[in-house]
Image (cartoon, rainbow, N blue to C red):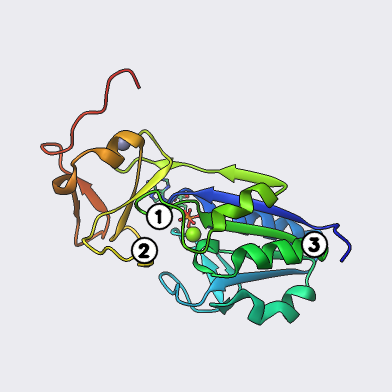
Amino acid sequence: MNFGGSITLVFGPMFSGKTTELIRLCDRQQLAGRKVLVIKYSKDTRYTANDEVSTHVGHTLPAIPTDKLFSVSDAALDAEVIGIDEGQFFPDIVQFADDMANAGKHVIVAALDGTFRRDPFPSRVIDLLPRAEHVTKLSAVCHICGRNAPFSRRITADTDVEVIGGADMYVAVCRHCFHADVTEGLKVDPKSRSPVRNMLTVPEPPRSW
Ligand code: ADP
Ligand code: MG
Ligand code: ZN
């Protein structure tokens, strides 16, 4: 233990640029000559091969896949900077990030701060907040009204907490559109696989915004 490490949290809803920011933060460390290890959740194969993290627009960075962080401890202890994408999905995220920071590693975690119901994830990734040196919460653009979108909303009927998907399953929403009855307005265009707005059924947000 040298306690010279740190934890940086990049929170936000779907589409807010968490992976983009993780890639940026890891890239600059690598360019400065630091040894960087990027870890991805092995069940997330939405956009890319299993040995890369990828943004929604296709930027990628080499990564090792796992579903248990402590199983890659040796590689992590060999690095100076550890980037973790989709941090909410790892059951051991809190202990791993804290242990690695205590061991002198700079740990950067990109994670959803809440589920599609705005509850904490079972992994309790949110418990890293009081243990972190740096915390950012990003926003996306509300898919329905165009305002700032700090939350995610699922547009399918699945009720499991872990359902991995992109624009075919989730939208980013503002507070108003999180609560609004917009199910009919969130139909997915089969061609672009993006949500399409149905002006007839999406209520107008309050004008004071
Ligand atoms: P995250 O990891 O937070 O899901 P990514 O870093 O993978 O996000 O992707 C962010 C990119 O997603 C943006 O730069 C933008 O190109 C795209 N995007 C798609 N829908 C939205 C939206 N509603 N708001 C903001 N960006 C969006
Ligand atoms: Mg991402
Ligand atoms: Zn909105």
Residue at image point 17% right, 48% down: 183
Local packing at callout 3 (Cα closer than 10 Å; few below 14, some 14-19, many 20+) is: some
User: How far across and down, in percent of the image, does residue 145 sit?
Assistant: 29, 35
On screen, residue 32 versus residue 85, left or right, reads right
Looking at the rendered structure, the kind of residue marked 2 is Val
Task: Indicate which disc, 1 or 2, sits on the residue closer to the N terminus.
Answer: 1
Residue bearing the label numbered 3? 102
Q: Considering only vertical position in the picture, is 40 above or below 27?
A: below
Q: Which image quadrant: the C terminus?
A: top left
Pointer 1 with pointer 2, Cβ within 8 A: yes
Residue at image point 43% right, 41% down: 150
Residue at image point 67% right, 68% down: 96
Instruction: Answer whether residue 146 is visible to the viewer in this image.
Output: no
**Residue 161 image label:** 2
Residue at image point 62% right, 49% down: 129
Residue bearing the label numbered 1? 115
Q: Spatial distance from mark 3 to mark 1, Cα to Cα?
A: 28 Å
Local packing at callout 2 (Cα closer than 10 Å; few below 14, some 14-19, many 20+) is: few
